[in-house]
Amino acid sequence: MTSVENHGKPKTPETGEKKWMLRLYVAGQTPKALTAFANLKKICEEHLDGNYRIEVIDLMVNPTLAKDDQILALPTLVRKLPEPVKKIIGDLSNTERVLVGLDIRPIN
Amino acid sequence: MAKSDKKSKPILDELLKTPTGIKGLDEITGGGLPQGRPTLVCGGAGCGKTLLAMEFLVHGATQYGEPGVFISFEEKSEDLSKNFASLGFDLNELESQNKLSIDYVHLEPREIAETGEYDLEGLFIRIGYAIDTIGAKRVALDTIEALFSGLPNESILRSELRRLFRFLKDKGVTAIITGEQGERTFTRFGLEEYVADCVIFLNHVVSQQIATRRLRIVKYRGSAHGTNEYPFLIDRQGFSVMPISSIGLDHPASTERIATGIPRLDAMMGGKGYYRGSSILVTGTAGTGKSSMAAHFVDAACKRGERCLYFAFEESQNQIIRNMHSIGIDLGQWVDQGLLQFQNARPSLYGLEMHLVVMHKAIDALKPGIVVVDPISNLMAAATEAEVKSMLSRLIDYLKMEQITAFCTDLTSTSGSLERTEVGISSLMDTWLLLQAMEGSGERNRGLYLLKSRGMAHSNQVREFILSDEGAQLKDVYVGSGGVLTGSARLGQEAKDKAESLEVKLEIERRQREIERKKAAIEAQISALHTQFENERDELERLIAKEKQRCETLDSENLTLAKARQADELSTQQGSTGKTRKGDRK
C-alpha cells in the first residue's frame, strides 16, 4: 500500500526509469512532515531536473513499512536509487546538507 | 514485602507487579517488576542484560499468557533466535504463535545525514504497531543506548526518550530497558534519569580469576525489596537468582532418625543414627575414609528409596562409583534408578556464590533427602575462609529449612590439631565425626571419634574404622598399658588376650575337676569307714549275742542245779539269781 504521490509533477515523460528514487517517510500531516516535503520538492526541482520520483510513505497508515528501511526518526528521506541507499533525517531545511547527503552535484 | 503488607490495609492503588518468572528475582522484588512501568536493567558488557530481558518476555509468553515485544538495537532477530536456542527458548516458534515479536532496529551512522528538526516517531510507530499486533503486555528494549551512537543530536534524543517511556507507560506495558554501565553512572547515557521506577544492576566481578555474577535492586519505587547483592547464574536453563541471605534461623527440627549405613556407627549414636535434616561433618586427613562414609550413608538412603545428591569437588562420578565398588557398595545402580545424582565440578570452575547457586538449583530440581558435599575444604581453593564459612552456613541453613540431611566431608591437614576444621564450620554442624590416622608398629590405621552429636546420647569411645570388601566396619580398639592399639597390633593383642582367657578357663576347669576328685575320694573314704563300722558293729553284736546266750545257758544250768539241790526259794530265781549264785559260789 505504498501511497505514491507524484507531487513532483514529473517533467520527464513516464517512459524510462527515473534516475532518482526517493522515499520520504512521515507520520501524518505534521508540520515537520509538510516542511520536509516542501523542502524536498524544492531541492528536486532545482537540482534533479525532473529525473526523479518521490514516494511519500505515511507510517501512520502503513506502520509495517518502517521495518524495511529501518526507520526510526521522522521525517526520513531515503535515497533508494541510485545505490547505495542513503538516509537523511530531519525536515531537510538545510539544503546544502541535503545535497551532500543525497550526493547531488549542483547543476552547473 | 512487609511494606506491601502494611500497605494492603487501606487498599488504595497498590503497586501491581508483573512476575518475571525468573527464579529468585520475583522473591527479591516481592512479586516481580512494577506493572505497566519501565524497569531499567543495567550492567557491564556480558553481564546478562539481554538474557534477563528476553527471559522476562519468554516467561511472560509461555507462563503468564502475556505476549511480549523485543526491540533489539544490537542483535538481529536471527542471531537472537540462535543464541536463545541454546537455552531452550524457541523464539521462532513463539513468534509464529504471535506470543513474541522481535524487531531489530538498526541505525547505520554512515548512511545517515541529519538536517533540521526530527523526532523518533518512526520508532514509536514500530513499537506501537508491534505491541498492538500481538496484544503485548511486555516490552524489552535492548539496548536503547545504541541510538546515542547512531543519532548525532543528543538533545532531541533525550527528549524523545523521555517521551518514549511515557509512551510505554501509556501503552500500559511492563518494559525492561537495558543499559550499558557507565563510568560513574549506572548507564553510560544516564538512562536512569528517565526510568525512575525500578533499577536493577547486574554485576560481573572477577576475583582471583573467578568470575561471579551478582544482581542488585538499586531502586524500586513504591515497593520493599531485597537490597543485597544476590549472586545469580546463567546456565542452560537460563537465569536464576538466589535470595539466600533472606533465610532465617527458624528451621524445623525433626526427631526422625536415619541410619548411617554403618550399623556399628548407629550403635554409637544410641542405635538409631543421625537426625533427619541435621548436618553431619566428617573431618579427617587424606585417605581416612571420609568419602567411604559418605558412600555408606548414600547407599543406605537409596536403599530406603530416598533421593540423594552428591556434590563431588574432587572426583568424577565414574571414579567414585568405581572406588566404592572396592568396598562393596554399588552406587551405579542408584544412579541408574535415578535415586542418586552426582554433581561434579572443580571448585575453581566458578566462584563460591555460583557454587551455591548451582547447588541450590540442583537441590531444587531433585528435591533430595540427603545432600553430600565432598569435600567442603576444596571450596577453599575458590575463596577465602570467611567466604567459605558464609557460603556454607547459607547452604546448611537452606538444607535445614528443606529438612535435607547434609553430609559434608572436610579434609584436614596432617599437621593440624585433632579437632581443627579448615573452615571453622564445626559450630554449624550437628554431628561431627573425626577420622584419624593412627600410626604405630609400622602401619597406619583409621580411628573414628564421635566428637559431638547434638541432641542424642552418643559413645565417647574411639573405634577402629576398617574398610573391607564388605564395606566399612567399626571395631573396638585395644586400650591397655601399651596405649591404644589398632590394626595388627590390636589383632595380636586380641590373640594374646584370647590365649590368656583360654588359660584361665582351663585352670578353672582343672580346679573344678580336682574338687570333684576330692569329693569322690572323701566319699569313698566315708563309705569304707561306714563298711568298717558295719563290720565292727556286726562283730560286736554277735559277741553280745553270744555272751547273752552264755548267760542264759548258765542261768538255766544254775536252775537245774538248784532244782537238783532242792532249793527252797524258787521265787527269787530271777532277781537274786546272781547273788544267790555268788553266794552260792562263796
Image: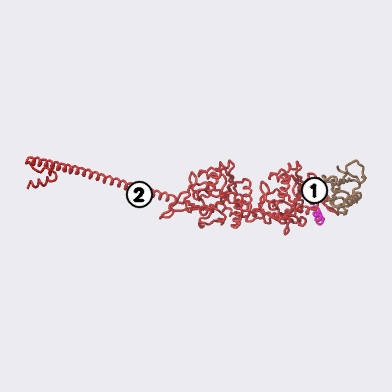
Chain colours: A brown, B red
- Residue B199 lies in magenta, yes or no? no
Residues tagged 1 and 2 counted as in contact (Cβ below 8 A) = no
Res. B79 visible in picture: no
Q: Which residue is mark 1?
A: B127
Which label is found at residue B420? none
Residue B555 on image: x %, y %: 12, 42
Q: Badge 1: few (under 14), some or many (20 or more) residues near its Cα, within 10 Å?
A: many
Q: Which residues are magenta?
A: B155-164
Q: Is residue B367 left or right of residue B26?
A: left
Q: Is residue B295 left or right of residue B50?
A: left
Which label is found at residue B504? 2
Tag 1, which chain? B
Tag 2: residue type? Val
Residue positioned 54% across, 49% down in the render: B274
Q: Is residue B352 left or right of residue B163?
A: left
Marks 1 and 2, Cα distance to the nearest angstrom? 100 Å
Whichever of callouts 1 and 2 sits on the residue coming sooner in the sequence is 1
For the residues tagged 1 and 2, is the chain the same? yes
Does the magenta stretch mainly form a helix, a strand or a loop?
helix
Q: Secondary structure at mark 1?
A: helix
Tag 1: residue type? Ile
Q: Badge 2: few (under 14), some or many (20 or more) residues near its Cα, within 10 Å?
A: few
- Residue B157 lies in magenta, yes or no? yes
Q: Nearer the viewer, residue B157 or B369?
A: B369
Q: Nearer the viewer, residue B336 or A90?
A: B336
Residue B334 on image: x %, y %: 57, 42
Q: Nearer the viewer, residue B470 or B248?
A: B248
Res. B493 visible in picture: yes
